[in-house]
Image (cartoon, rainbow, N blue to C red):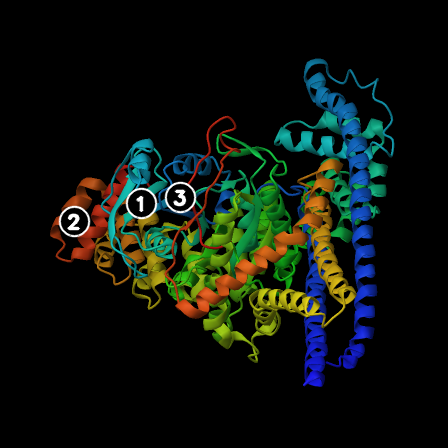
Amino acid sequence: MDFDALNIAAPLVEFAFWLGVAVTAITLVMLAVTLVMRRVALRRDRIYLEAVARWRPLIVAEPRAAGAAGAAGADGLPRLSARDRSGFIRVWNEVHESLHGGTTDNLARIARETGLEPQLYGALQSRSFHDRVMALIALGHVRSAASFTHLVTHLHDMSPIMSLCAARALMQVDPERAAPLLVRRIVERSDWSQGNIAVILQEAGGALVSGPLTEATRTAHGELASRLIRLLAGVSPASAAPIIRSWLLAAENEHVVSTCLQVMSNAPDLDCVRPLLAHPRWHVRMLAAATLGRLGVPGDEQRLIAMLSDRQWWVRYRAAGGLLHLSFVGPERLRQIQDTQSDTYARDIITHVLAEQAIGGAA
Amino acid sequence: MSAFWAQLIVGLEWTFFGYFLCITAAYLALHYVAVFSIIDYMRDHRAEYLPQNLPDYQPPISILIPAFNEERSINSTIHSLLQLDYPEFEVVIVSDGSTDSTLSSVIREFSMVEFPEAYRQRIRTEKVRGIYASTRYPNVRLVDKVNGGKADALNAGINCVRYPLICSIDADCILHRTSLGRVVRPFLEDSSTVASGGVVRVLNGCTVKDGFLEKVDLPRRLLPMFQNVEYLRAFLFGRMGWSPSNALLVISGAFGVFRKERVVAIGGYRTDTVGEDMDLVVRLHRRAREQRRPYRITFVPDPICWTEVPSDLKSLMGQRMRWQRGLAESLVPNVGLVFRRRAGAVGWLAFPFMFLFELVGPIVEIVGYISMIVLWWFHLIPLQTFLVFLFLAVGMGIMLSTNAIFLEELSFQMYPRVGQQLRLFLAALLENIGYRQLIAFWRVIGMLKWLFSGTARSHWGEIARDGSWQHPKGAGEAGTREDASA
């Protein structure tokens, strides 16, 4: 057989060989880079842990010393070196967070005596994301008015983490000035986690943010309205009540209506909830039944009983659970209601929630 | 005739080489995306920068544990789940007609009583014989049903759960205390999220105490060590690479969270496949695309679930054949997702990638090896050519595994000692010489089984486990079960 034609493949084989050599070289480079990265990370961790070990006893001891002996005990604090900065900030932030609103005067004094604030401004320019965020958190704890403009710059950062940390720090530094700025950003930033915003608002206190937040909520629509109503109801149920009422009365956007039903706490507004028991969407009926269970008055008992025969399991379940939660119904009365039901589904769901209640489950 | 054969050989060489270049380029592209995704993720989640969310903002979750003959591990799994750091969750164990003492053991351990559940069959399943509730832990329930396979057990669990998010986990998995909080994060950050999955890591070699991971280490045996490298590859760039473009096609059955109503809307898990976890994700994509509904399916790279991998060849063979079969059963019925106008990255990139490189790849690889050997054996190509192609194929495999080790260093550094890294690299080197080819061969067998025996019912794969991570001084635990796919 003549296989001369195979020579055509020779360049391919040669190419494959050199490609293999290149791949081997890349592999070795990757391995070397990985090992170097490990060495660098180990060295960084060592420096960091040394700083933490050096500063933790001093920082942790200071708040206690303040309680026992006033301002005494600060004389021995060393100057904060650039090498120790990252470890110091971490410990300082941790101690702040662990005090949960307790007195932080002595921590502030440590910050002054170690020259922390200028170091934090330096850290804000760092290339490390971690160092920048930790500096933002620390600036919030320092509560220096001078840091406000620095923090505002970071409020507009693209990263949700960075901008949320800046928002929290701003609310710690000057809540009155920061609240309108924060609310504007809440409206604009759909990538901010609702839970994180709620924590920041709660820390700041409802009175300060409810004004601008109410204004923003009044003019919001759709998804945004839903987000804002939830936040407003968390910080100021009284401010949220009229807005919730107007959305329930309009009953146009079922998503917003669902949110309103979940967060409403104003019993006089139940007149807007009762018509929703006949809503075509089952999840609205379910939430309306749950709301009547939470806030209902004696006349609502019959309405919930009617819902026990709803075609949707969840509506029946919430109606039965709602009846059980009504202070004037209770298990005994619910058993009597069960005896009067001709619908098997209604009887079964009552058996279910009674059993759930008996074992302490979530009816 | 000879010219014909010569042309055929040349054609073969070019075909295999071209395919090989394409598959490598595709994996490298995935690696490139994964590097940037992991850098971004690590930047934001290196530390807990913000205070913990208020409980009201953490959606309650129903954890589903499908179980078949899990008497050895089920109680410790439930106990460890009860210690999870999450405000509101329930645990629903589904005993799928277990023939051992799984049912009685759970009933006894958790003081369970029969519960008069108003059971509604939103998804059709095998008969549910009874539902039990714990009198000590109000958030623990047990479903006893007729055997119907893992998918059927999951569907029965979905029919019973109370909460809007469901989390399926394997009965023998170990979670971190913070796992639920991490895997649910995508749902809090983006309300259109319908599913999220986390990294599954190899438990062999680690130490577990009281249901929680106490010490992370590399497996001591070679076979689990090779799988460790595979898992790094599969999760760190296989999945992290697809997640940013919303094209993730696999969420491991061992640990994933789903929006319940979306799962019910597509009829739950399919019971006529052994790859029910992948199939579910593919169908979630397809349905959302068809309905033009905004959605996200996300991958969370934190190491949040640990599982024991097979340490014997027989179990590994069965597992890989099932996985390949599951892959085929998930892709082929959903081929309508490909190249549609609104199919997005999932229909235009991820699905064709999975089809061409994951499904067909092992066949091409094995045919390539065999043809090269045959051609060399019959002196139709010189030894030099054979060795060059082998050098390239093995070298490329080692490079991809080294990339995965690099990603691990870039991210969670679970193996921080230099010695551990060198051992990982050695495993990356060795797994490409023999092990990878063996796995490809088993995958081809899995494909052939799928081609010639039609669809299979979702069933419980059997794996011999040594369990040394849990009982350091005890005897091995043989014959426990695992899911049909990872």
Asked if residue A182 shows in the view, the reply is no
Q: CA distance from mark 3 to mark 2?
A: 29 Å
Q: Are marks 1 and 2 on the same chain?
A: no
Q: Residues within 10 Å of mark 2 (few under 14, many from 20)?
A: some
Q: Residues within 10 Å of mark 3 (few under 14, many from 20)?
A: many
Q: Quadrant of residue A316?
A: bottom left
Q: Quadrant of residue B149?
A: bottom left
Q: Which mark is residue B98?
A: 1
- The amino acid beneath tag 2 is Ile
The residue beneath circle 3 is B90
Placement of the N terminus of chain B among the 4 image quadrants: bottom right
- The amino acid beneath tag 3 is Glu
User: Percent position (x, y) of residue A238?
Assistant: 48, 49
Q: Chain of mark 3?
A: B
Q: Are marks 3 and 1 on the same chain?
A: yes
Q: Chain of mark 1?
A: B
Total labels drawn: 3
Q: Is residue B367 above or below residue B132?
A: below
Q: CA distance from mark 3 to mark 1?
A: 22 Å
Q: CA distance from mark 1 to mark 2?
A: 39 Å
- The amino acid beneath tag 1 is Ser
Earlier residue among tags 3 and 1? 3
**Of the residues tagged 3 and 2, which is closer to the observer?**
3
Q: Residues within 10 Å of mark 1 (few under 14, many from 20)?
A: some
